Amino acid sequence: MIVPPRPATACIVRIATCLALGARFAAGTAEDFNMQVTAAGIQLGSHVSGPHLDADALRNRVVLLEFWGVHCPPCIAAMPKLEELHRKLGPAGLVVVGAHAQGGTAEAIRRTAGDLGVTFTIVEQARVEGGTDFNGIPHCMLFDHTGACIHRGSPHAAHDKVVAAVQASPAMVLGGRALTKLTGLEQTLRDEKTFGSVLKKVAAMKASSDKDTADEAAFVAERLEARGHEMLAHATSLKGSDPVAATALLQRCATIFRGSDLATEASQQLREWKKDPTYQSVIKAGQQFAQLESLRARLLAALGADTPSPEVVAAVPPAVKKQMQELVKSVHKYGSGSKLTEQADAIATEFGLQAERP
């Protein structure tokens, strides 16, 4: 893994090294690495951004683990493609994880991922048992739904293998089981938007005179209901730390299970939350922070910069700095005690603004 050097020439050295390593691994083959690593050997390290994952979340899933760094141009270039795979194939069972493997603070990693539009999980200090046999990034490991490693090396060479692995895997919600009587549902269940309609369909099929069909219908219904309850429980667990994500999850559950008891429960829970003044306050803080992040991104884009260097900060108009400062204050006003205040203060510090203090 590449650790950025300390001298003043660090930036030039980092870029040259990363470009060279990126070219090297783009040409690498599976034979260069240990292909006996498995998804069971993944240790996710510390969460930085995106969905929180644990070992259970990787089981029976196609997993694309990408080792990358904020100071590595080839890594940065690969991230939008990974995000595209995440958005298109995530609902079908793909899990994308960006494992940061360079020096840098969690805030800098989070900021870079945000600037790149990355919504998949980002972690740091991740490792794979038996998989430390590489010394350059970007480096990806692709595991199929059985946990076997089917690709290592350049992320640019993984696209077709990712698509094929997802297509060959059972629908995510089925937990690795292939259907024999209701095979027509396997492809349908790759899209979570169908969960509500399929749940209604299999509810009627549980009374089938064919025992195998009835048993399989009962299994599908059980898996779908378990998925819905899992979403409800996850939303509840996120309410205190990330109410914006919790709200989105409840709304998603209500949408995909429309017409079922799960949708009713999700909607009712959301209505109850909205009666809580503390919850509403933190939601407003999240909206203010989103405006702050958006302003930061637009500002950097307008100034043609990736990070707020002293020169960039000096070029920011006073009126814009004042607007940013007001947004930071609003985050503190409505989100006191939440992690949003720390993130807002980090942006304030970047631009030489006064961070709010209790």
Image (cartoon, rainbow, N blue to C red):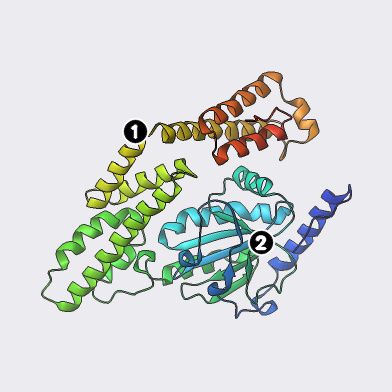
Viewed as shown, does residue 156 lie left or right of 237?
right
- Relative to residue 117, is residue 228 depicted above or below? below
Label of residue 215 in the image: none
Quadrant location of the N terminus in the rendered image: bottom right
Pointer 2 residue: 125
Along the viewing direction, whichever of 333 and 114 lies nearer the viewer: 333
Amino acid carrying label 2: it is: Gln
Along the viewing direction, whichever of 125 and 27 lies nearer the viewer: 125
Q: Mark 1 and mark 2: span between their CA atoms? A: 40 Å
Pointer 1 residue: 275
Q: Quadrant of residue 41?
A: bottom right
Quadrant location of the C terminus in the rendered image: top right
> Residue at 32% of width from left, 67% of height from top?
186
Please report whichever mark, 1 or 2, sits nearer to the chain's N-terminal start.
2
| Picture coordinates of residue 115, whole percent (x, y) | 62, 42
Residue lying furthest left: 209
* Element at label 1: loop
Viewed as shown, does residue 138 lie left or right of 5?
left
